[in-house]
Image (spheres, rainbow, N blue to C red):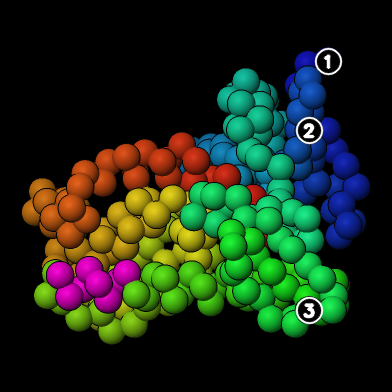
């Protein structure tokens, strides 16, 4: 069956905004957004939600936009196939902490505090609260690690970082403001250590150079002590998979 977009029944009762992409063994929700600021049609696949997102200018008809999107069906299928299945944080599941699998071990008789023990994430208490408690623990753990590494590189660079915070942005792994505050994606703790540390060095270097010129890149490499290119390559090729983990 050739790939196509079909109308579905939306929970909000708006069939015009509820479409499904179907092609071969691939099926995904499609969201069409009409943007008054868009000059051209844009198509992307959200790795977190596995949705196909189509943005179109006001002057472009819906039928023309869907026909254009269908012309890109091989690319859509490839992007969807590259997305790993969504991972839950339930007993028996595994979390790729530092890019190494850490099983979730649960015993209702144990303390509900989440702990890291012998390569496992251990907790007790009510089973139905395991996932939100692990999410909160992951966020705290990420903040602890990223704060410590930021302080380490800030001393090396001779700069002051006024605040370290974490969030869950979709499009960036870190950001540095002119006020000296740095914000990271908590999901960096799911990546290998060298990837996380390269990202920290990158953001700290922005406290010296608020640009991406040669002096900035030289400072990143000096702070890191090695070439950050492999870390950037890892995030480009595998970073999207980190967004398929609950959190």
Q: Mark 3 and mark 1: span between their CA atoms? A: 52 Å
In this view, the residue farthest toward the left is 215
Instruction: Pinpoint residue 177: horizontal percent, then vertical percent.
Output: 29, 73
In this image, 21 relative to 154: left or right?
Answer: right
Residue at (78%, 20%) from the top-left corner? 24
- Asked if the residues shown at circle 2 and circle 3 are in contact, with their CB atoms under 8 angstroms apart, the answer is no
Task: Considering the whole magenta stretch, tell me its main secondary structure.
Answer: helix
Instruction: Pinpoint residue 35: horizontal percent, then vertical percent.
Output: 56, 51
2 or 3: tag closer to the N-terminus:
2
Give SS at disc 1.
Answer: loop
Q: Which residue is mark 3?
A: 110
Q: Which residue is mark 2?
A: 27
Q: Which residues are magenta?
A: 149-156
Give SS at disc 2.
Answer: strand
Question: What is the crowding at mark 1: few (fewer than 14 residues within 10 Å), some, or many (at least 20)?
Answer: few
3 or 1: tag closer to the N-terminus:
1
2 or 1: tag closer to the N-terminus:
1
Instruction: Pinpoint residue 179: horizontal percent, then vertical percent.
Output: 25, 81
Q: Mark 2 and mark 1: span between their CA atoms? A: 12 Å
In this image, 209 relative to 177: left or right?
Answer: left
Q: Which residue is mark 1?
A: 1
Give SS at disc 3.
Answer: loop
The answer to whether 65 is drawn above or below residue 164 in the figure is above
The answer to whether 149 is drawn above or below residue 120 in the figure is below
Q: Which numbered tag is attached to residue 188? A: none
Instruction: Pinpoint residue 111: horizontal percent, then vertical percent.
Output: 75, 82
Residue at (8%, 54%) from the top-left corner? 215
In this image, 123 relative to 137: left or right?
Answer: right
Front position in the image: 221 or 82: 221
Residue 65 drawn in magenta = no
Question: What is the crowding at mark 2: few (fewer than 14 residues within 10 Å), some, or many (at least 20)?
Answer: some
């Amino acid at each position: 069956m050739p790939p196509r977009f079909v109308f579905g029944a939306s929970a909000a009762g708006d069939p015009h905004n509820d479409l499904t992409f179907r092609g071969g063994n691939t099926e995904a929700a499609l969201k069409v957004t009409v943007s008054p600021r868009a000059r051209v049609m844009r198509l992307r696949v959200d790795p977190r939600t596995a949705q196909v997102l189509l943005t179109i200018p006001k002057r472009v008809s819906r039928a023309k936009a869907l026909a254009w999107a269908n012309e890109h069906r091989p690319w859509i299928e490839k992007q969807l196939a590259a997305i790993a299945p969504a991972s839950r944080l339930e007993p028996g599941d595994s979390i790729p902490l530092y890019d190494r699998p850490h099983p979730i071990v649960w015993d209702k008789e144990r303390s509900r505090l989440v702990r890291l023990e012998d390569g496992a994430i251990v907790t007790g208490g009510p089973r139905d609260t395991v996932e939100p408690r692990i999410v909160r623990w992951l966020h705290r753990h990420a903040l602890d690690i990223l704060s410590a590494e930021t302080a380490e590189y800030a001393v090396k660079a001779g700069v002051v970082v006024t605040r370290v915070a974490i969030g869950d942005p979709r499009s960036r792994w870190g950001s540095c403001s002119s006020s000296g505050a740095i914000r990271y994606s908590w999901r960096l703790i799911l990546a290998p250590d060298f990837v996380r540390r390269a990202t920290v060095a990158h953001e700290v270097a922005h406290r010296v150079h608020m640009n991406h010129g040669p002096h900035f890149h030289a400072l990143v490499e000096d702070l890191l002590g090695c070439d950050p290119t492999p870390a950037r390559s890892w995030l480009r090729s595998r970073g999207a998979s980190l967004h398929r983990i609950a959190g």
